[in-house]
Image (cartoon, helix red, strand yellow):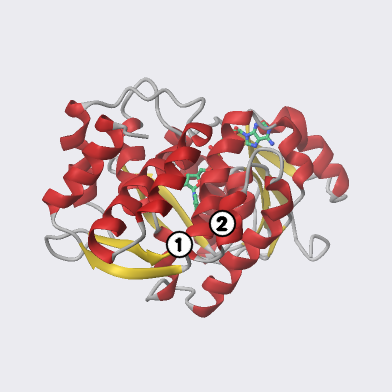
Amino acid sequence: MLSKASQVFILTDENVAPFWLPEVAHWLHCESAIDIVIKAGEQHKNLQTVQRIWKTLMKHHADRNALLINLGGGTITDLGGFAASTYKRGIRFINAPTTLLAMVDAAIGGKTGIDFGGAKNQIGTFTEAEDVLIDPIFLTTLPEREIRSGMAEMLKYGFISDSKLLEINLENYQQYITHCGEIKREIVAKDPYEKGLRKVLNFGHTLGHAIESHCLTKDTPLLHGEAVALGMRAALWLSVKQCGLNEKVLKDYEKQLPMLLAEAVMDLDKTDVEPILSYLAHDKKNRGEKPQFVLLEAVGKPVLDVEVSMETVRLSLEDTIINKVW
Ligand SMILES: NC(=O)c1ccc[n+]([C@@H]2O[C@H](COP(=O)([O-])OP(=O)(O)OC[C@H]3O[C@@H](n4cnc5c(N)ncnc54)[C@H](O)[C@@H]3O)[C@@H](O)[C@H]2O)c1
């Protein structure tokens, strides 16, 4: 595939580049590839960075047979996928995920995008990568906090699909990476454009995204998986109240939360509730007034499009970020 490309570009960030950029160029026999190294972090997943990528492609006269390799975490695969899918109406791209979260989730399934207007993933496309190159060797340089963040997304697959994944811990998680990717691929294959089934992948993300967007405005932002970990706790609480989920599932998950959030700075209090709820009101998945959630009747039995009143959402959020019974 690389040999068919008129030019190869490698997009990565400043943290990943020193560890892996020369190695990957060597492994893929593309040492002459043009590197695009951007600043790391969600706050750079924006239009300015995309413009920088487009300008670099233009400066090097990239044509429609050029290929972009996205080497990094979900920020890079989302951004690079978006830049590639829009440049000259679309050039091919390959994802080489270097975080656990991107290996099990972000790099797979064709959702690309950037944050805009202060909210996450507001602009984007559905465009599949030509290939996704998964190698756990990249995880040897990944900080443990990022591993914990990725484990939250792995637990998500446990809740929506396979209870075996609820057993993961810091020692055994690597053996389940492929399995999580397979679950995602299977769901996406059935519903690539999120008309129905694919929405199950948003379990924990409705409030999770709102918490993440709000925390991005603070000095101590939460990682994506950390925000999702909190969003899943609220979703399980709502599932007990509205869908008859056995409370034991919630209680068991609460025992895992300290592991997922061990390195997160949790400085959320009552003053954070309103701003988080207003992000939720802007969530693109909501129709009309009431937010819609993916909830669970039981582990492996998700229910889509459950309408929840704003008051009940507020209670679930307060119970999760203020009462912190867990
Ligand atoms: N498109 C999708 O389907 C989808 C799904 C889930 C999440 N996402 C998106 O993914 C993003 C989060 O991705 P993420 O958690 O991978 O974060 P990230 O890409 O920001 O990476 C986290 C940090 O780890 C560093 N890093 C990455 N790989 C490294 C390595 N091997 N060694 C050392 N440092 C490394 C990065 O520089 C960064 O500082 C969010 O923007 C989220 O919206 C997208």
Query: Which is nearer the eye, 42 or 222?
Result: 222
Q: Position of residue 147 (x, y in %)?
A: 61, 37
Tell me what residue is drawn at x 30 percent, y 38 percent.
Answer: 320
Q: Quadrant of the N terminus?
A: bottom right
Image quadrant assignment for residue 285: bottom left
Q: Residues within 10 Å of mark 2 (few under 14, many from 20)?
A: many
User: What residue is disc 2 on?
Assistant: 84
Relative to 205, is 145 on the left or the right? Answer: right
Q: Which numbered mark, 1 or 2, is in the foreground of this view?
A: 1
Q: Amino acid at mark 2?
A: Ala
Q: Residues within 10 Å of mark 1 (few under 14, many from 20)?
A: many
Q: Can you say whether 275 is above or below 232 in the image?
A: above
Query: Which is nearer the eye, 57 or 129?
Result: 129
Res. 276 in view? yes
Q: Can you say whether 23 is above or below 155 in the image?
A: above
Q: Position of residue 136 (x, y in %)?
A: 75, 45
Tell me what residue is drawn at x 72 percent, y 42 percent.
Answer: 34
Relative to 133, is 56 on the left or the right? Answer: left
Q: Position of residue 119 (x, y in %)?
A: 30, 44
